């Protein structure tokens, strides 16, 4: 198995995962209407997705360490099939359970495919980790686009998600045959060995994903309520953020090759802080959309580089990847409600100041996102 074919395969897995995950998420309005749920009830059900992810990732990190990443990525078709479950829900409880399973499935595949990415990068000797996350971003755009087309055509969530799951599972089956056969270590640790560097990488990941989660949850509200944007303009903040994040990840490997991972992460975090700072300070529709776009470009490499640093620093990357990823997604989970609480106490503009502050914390700790020393005998 050549590293080139394995790179294509793991890139495809990242794309498939992005498409599957965004596809079910984009059909939530129809599922909400079908179950007659209030916004608060839907929010409660959606809380189960990151909860499932946070519960699954530490355990899967140990499995990847002992059995190898390819053995877990081979389950990708099953993970893709999980996206049908929310469409089968009959009430709030069954929706929460379905979303919990989807979150756990996505979190499990997330750790395994990132560990496979680390293994392929080691084998190829070429930077590629950010481009893998770009594939996830563009897969998410494709999944959301297909969902939008299905909704516009009046297709119900169940048949749409069944077809989407079948397409993603079929794509995964094509790619998993070409993955790199990394070997597990039966005696490996199930959990990462705690170090100051790993803790610092966790803080960087926490700050980056909290910032990302704030854009997903609050950019539209900010544009509508604080910047006075028209209804058709309010979604453009998230669209600009997502597009620039995907494009930024395509170029991040080349930038990091030239200036180093630490400098790339530091510069990206500072750019992200400046972007959200412009949006908050100026608070006009054009400035806000431009600020969120700049923020997406800046954040694009920060989380992938933190994961890469954790994975490449260990002979067995699974537990370290799980530790950093779990802390990062804790930020994604807790950030939006904290911003909401701060907004209730003051204003959304003042609450969002938490985001550039944490981006600057990530910049300050970016020295830990350093490139590992070459290993003896590595190519």
Image (cartoon, helix red, strand yellow):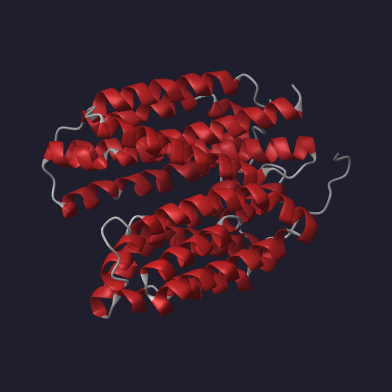
Q: Across the whole image, how many numbered discs are drawn on residues?
A: 0
Q: Is residue 268 left or right of residue 93?
A: right
Q: Residue furthest right?
A: 377
Q: Residue at x 32, y 37 (%)?
A: 148
Residue 228, percent across and down? 28, 70
Q: Residue at x 55, y 29 (%)?
A: 73
Indicate the quadrant where residue 100 lies: top left
**Residue 210: percent from the left, percent from the top?**
44, 62
Instruction: Say which of 355 and 77 sits in front.
Output: 355
Question: Along the line of sight, which residue is nearer the eye, 277 or 60?
Answer: 277
Q: Is residue 68 above or below residue 194?
A: above
Q: Position of residue 21 (x, y in %)?
A: 40, 38
Q: Is residue 262 left or right of 338 when viewed as pictured? A: right
Is 331 situated above or below 189? below
Which residue is painted at 38% across and 64% down in the image?
335
Can residue 192 be seen from the camera position used here?
no
Residue 304 in sight in this render:
yes
- Residue situated in front as seen by the camera: 336 or 229: 229
- Can you tell which quarter of the image residue 267 is in? bottom right
In the rendered image, the residue lying farthest to the left is 36
Residue at (40% x, 20% y) in the render = 166
Asked which quadrant contains residue 64, the reply is top right
Q: Quadrant of the C terminus?
A: top right
Q: Quadrant of the N terminus?
A: top right
């Amino acid at each position: 198995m050549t590293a080139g074919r394995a790179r294509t395969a793991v890139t495809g897995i990242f794309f498939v995962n992005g498409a599957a995950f965004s596809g079910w998420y984009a059909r939530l309005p129809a599922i909400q209407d079908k179950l007659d749920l209030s916004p608060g009830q839907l929010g409660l059900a959606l809380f189960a997705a990151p909860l499932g992810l946070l519960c699954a990732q530490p355990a899967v990190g140990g499995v990847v360490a002992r059995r190898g990443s390819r053995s877990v990525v081979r389950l990708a078709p099953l993970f893709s099939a999980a996206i049908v479950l929310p469409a089968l829900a009959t009430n709030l409880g069954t929706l929460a359970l379905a979303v919990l399973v989807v979150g756990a499935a996505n979190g499990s595949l997330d750790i395994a495919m990132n560990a496979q990415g680390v293994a392929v990068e080691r084998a190829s000797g070429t930077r590629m980790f950010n481009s893998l996350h770009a594939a996830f971003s563009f897969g998410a755009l494709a999944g959301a686009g297909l969902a939008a087309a299905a909704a516009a055509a009046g297709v119900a969530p169940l048949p749409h998600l069944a077809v989407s799951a079948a397409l993603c599972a079929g794509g995964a089956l094509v790619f998993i045959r070409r993955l790199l056969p990394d070997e597990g270590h039966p005696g490996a640790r199930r959990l990462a060995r705690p170090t100051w560097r790993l803790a610092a990488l966790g803080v960087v990941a926490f700050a980056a994903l909290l910032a990302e989660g704030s854009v997903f949850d609050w950019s539209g509200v900010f544009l509508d309520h604080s910047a006075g944007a028209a209804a058709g303009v309010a979604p453009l903040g998230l669209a600009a953020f997502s597009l620039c994040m995907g494009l930024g990840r395509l170029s991040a490997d080349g930038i990091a090759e030239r200036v180093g991972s630490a400098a790339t992460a530091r510069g990206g975090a500072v750019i992200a802080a400046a972007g959200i700072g412009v949006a908050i300070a100026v608070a006009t529709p054009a400035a806000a959309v431009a600020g969120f776009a700049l923020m997406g470009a800046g954040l694009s490499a920060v989380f992938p580089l933190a994961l890469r640093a954790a994975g490449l620093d260990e002979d067995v990357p699974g537990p370290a990847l799980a530790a950093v990823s779990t802390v990062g997604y804790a930020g994604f989970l807790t950030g939006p409600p904290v911003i909401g609480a701060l907004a209730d106490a003051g204003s959304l503009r003042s609450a969002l100041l938490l985001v550039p502050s944490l981006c600057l914390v990530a910049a300050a700790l970016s020295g830990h996102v350093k490139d590992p020393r070459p290993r003896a005998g590595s190519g």
